[in-house]
Image: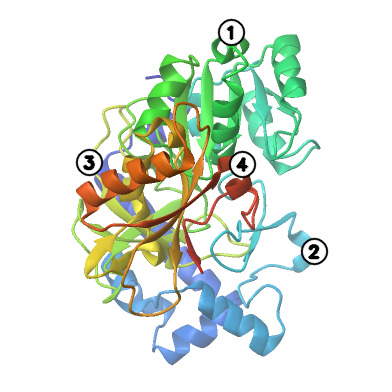
Amino acid sequence: MEFLQPEIETLDRASLDNLQLRKVATLVRFAYENSVLYRERWKAAGVRPESIDSLDSFRRHTPLLGKKELVDFRERRGDPYCGLLCVDPTLVNNIGTSSGTTAEPMPLVELVDGAPPFASTVRDMWGAGLRPGDRVLHCFATQRGPQERVYHRIGCVPMMVNMRMGADWDIVFRMIRDHQPTHIYLLGFMIAELARLSRDHDLKSIFAPIKVAVVTGEPLGARMRARMKEEWGLELFEVTGTADVGVAWDCKAHDGFHIWDDYVYAECLDPVTGLTVADGQPGELVCTALANLAWPLIRYRSGDLVRLRREPCACGRTHTRFHLLGRISDQLSVAGVSILPMQLWQIIERVDQTATAVFQIVHPGTADVSHLALRIGYDTLEGTTVDALRATLAERITAQIGLTPDIELMSADALLASSPSGIKLPRVVKS
């Protein structure tokens, strides 16, 4: 595999650890001096910057941070930056928010040139095959913005085209034909729409100039990954978030999401005790932004259940990577059975009419959940009826999960349209 920055991407583990320690020590001193929130919380916890002399002492002494603490500070002090801003507000050149799919959107404040994902994602894009002169069809916006800068760093030509829900895909397909992009950047919900369009369009022919599809927003099931590769001719790379401090891509080995250790310090913790779990064991992803000195998130809880790995990847990179298991808040106990949406995903996508796995678990909002209620979107009813499809799904879920579900069926498009963020579909919703 060809690397953009081989001296960094293949750095040995001991050197990466030393690099992270130097950056952590610098960050802690800087945040203590410039962030009202950190100084307030760390003083209360008895933390002084000079006491952080190892990654172990950083983990042991520095309090975890979550969205609740940011919201509480903002409401208490009337500070839109939640007490984290460490630079003059006039220096900030990018302000966004998290998606808001499962909770209130939170601010994300960055100095574009120095912080991930803008500075580190170029390595991932290079690893996915992007080269100077390549054209990239991008789904997020139709106007220029910070994302453009990432492509320009490689020398690519971004094509900013509207592919959001309800977009005219004939226009998108014409753009592909006329401008021959080599890469396409998609949100997860678009895959369901493309699956529907594939009944009337030859997507393999349309996507012929495209070498790589990058998918973010939601994970892909095994069946859909295979379909996109075999039927549509797309090589896939998935992208996910790292606790709002950046993004992580998979690579050509497709064996986990890569975190760049010179930009992010990642931990995997028991979500209840906050103690470190061994590599390869499930726990909550907690991240520290080592490069964003404008608005640094330090030991920030992601709410994601992952398995963290630090051995070198088959692609040759040596940085930390993880496997995403699901959202901790989505883990439910139903009649004594522990369930994560990904377990249901694997069952639902195997049924032809629900292959895109557009579904939600409907939570009654009580501590005691006695039955499994599901809302499932079907792509088509070809070859069956609503009642027959409901029976098929219920039978398969009962056989593999051990619970007989109550299933509400509706069109996949209608269910996707209910997403509050327009980017991701919340997998667990209250009734």
Drawn side of residue 76 relative to residue 405, left or right: right
- Determine whether the residue tagged by mark 4 lies in a helix, strand or loop: helix
Q: Which mark is residue 217?
A: none
- Determine whether the residue tagged by mark 1 lies in a helix, strand or loop: helix
Measure the C-alpha gap from mark 3 to mark 1: 40 Å
Q: Which residue is mark 1?
A: 205
Q: Which residue is mark 3?
A: 311
**Amino acid at circle 1:** Ser
**Amino acid at circle 2:** Thr
Measure the C-alpha gap from mark 4 to mark 1: 24 Å
Judge by depth and name the residue closer to the eye, 16 or 387: 387
Q: Tell me which numbered mark, 4 or 1, is placed earlier along the sequence.
A: 1
Task: Identify the residue shown where x is 57% and y is 57%.
Answer: 292
Decide: few, some or many residues near mark 4? Use Cα within 10 Å; few <14, some 14-19, many ≥20.
some
**Amino acid at circle 4:** Asp
Measure the C-alpha gap from mark 3 to mark 4: 41 Å
Q: Which mark is residue 413?
A: 4
